[in-house]
Image (spheres, rainbow, N blue to C red):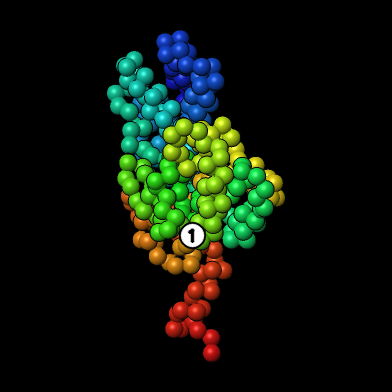
Amino acid sequence: MDSDEREWINRFLSHLAHERRLSAHTVAAYGHDLSTLAEFCKRRTLESWQALENLHLRTFAAAQHGAGLSPRSIQRRLSAARTFYEFLMREGHCTRNPALEVRAPKPKKRLPATLDADQMGRLLAFRVDDSLSTRDKAIMELFYSSGLRLAELAGLDMAAVDIKDRTVRVLGKGNKTRIVPIGRQAIDALKNWLPQRAGLVKGGIQALFVGQSGRPLSVRAVQLRVAAWGRRQGIGVHVHPHMFRHSFATHLLESSGNLRGVQELLGHANIGTTQIYTHLDFQHLATVYEAAHPRARRR
């Protein structure tokens, strides 16, 4: 690709900087991505931008992936090519956009961070000696016992919890209500917290969890308290509220194998969302296989 064709990149970058007023950092990123594409065209002996075909761009994306570039970075380069060709078409230099319908490889799904049962036990094994530690214990036991989202727990009021029936009524995403069981240790922690709460709450506040001021506890306060207990208990990783939900789902699925039941407890509308928790470790799978498969049972 000769210098005249490469000059179109400079014109495009000037357009981004002066007409669209993008930041210098963004303009530089476009420049780097398009220079990479220009080098690819040179190796393929493509003489002009008009010569670049849809198949060439698919090959370009595949080559970038083979070189170790992340799917997100490849998507950014393809996006840069699409925007560049829109400019070329507007300027009359090209008649079509070969970057349309070219997609980057799908990124691998990141598995949610979890604590194993021993880590969770260590995290929750702290003495309560004041109202705040009593409250925090109830919060974390309820998180792990019932798999609640942070917003769901922070939004609980007194009427949502039925201590006798050992259930909690949760208002989830899409304003959908579900009833979730509460485990024995979470019930015990809540029973310890409720008298402490009565001494803190003021007026007619109905929130289940309140701070020292007697006002409802914010989601940020819950995040900070959970992280602080993770450090205090020596867990070694950053502990956040959603980690309890992930651990709840993973441990329950490992023990029961009931994906549909876990979906109901988590309040997932789509079972595909729940399937991410099927990342059972190999040792667990091997144990299940040895115990259950007729051809695997050892004599």
Which residue occupies the foreground of this view, 210 or 27?
210
Mark 1, other Cα within 10 Å: few <14 / some 14–19 / many ≥20: some
Which residue sits at x=67%, y=48%?
129
Which residue occupies the foreground of this view, 83 or 277?
277
Q: Which residue is mark 1?
A: 183
Which residue sits at x=65%, y=50%?
128
Residue 72, how many percent across, how many down? 48, 38
Using the image, determine if residue 285 lies above or below residue 100: below
Which residue occupies the foreground of this view, 234 or 46?
234
Residue 251, how many percent across, how many down? 51, 61
**Amino acid type at mark 1:** Gly
Residue 169 at least partly seen: yes
Residue 11 at least partly seen: no
The picture quadrant where one finds residue 204 is top left
Counting labels gives 1
Which residue sits at x=39%, y=46%?
159
Residue that sits furthest to the top in the current view: 18
Using the image, determine if residue 9 lies above or below residue 53: above
Residue that sits furthest to the left in the current view: 95
Which residue sits at x=54%, y=42%?
197
Residue 22, how many percent across, how many down? 47, 16
Which residue occupies the foreground of this view, 243 or 167?
167
Using the image, determine if residue 56 lies above or below residue 247: above
Q: Secondary structure at mark 1?
A: loop
Q: Is residue 100 left or right of residue 216?
A: left
Residue 205, how many percent across, how many down? 45, 35
The picture quadrant where one finds residue 130 is top right
Q: Is residue 48 left or right of residue 128?
A: left
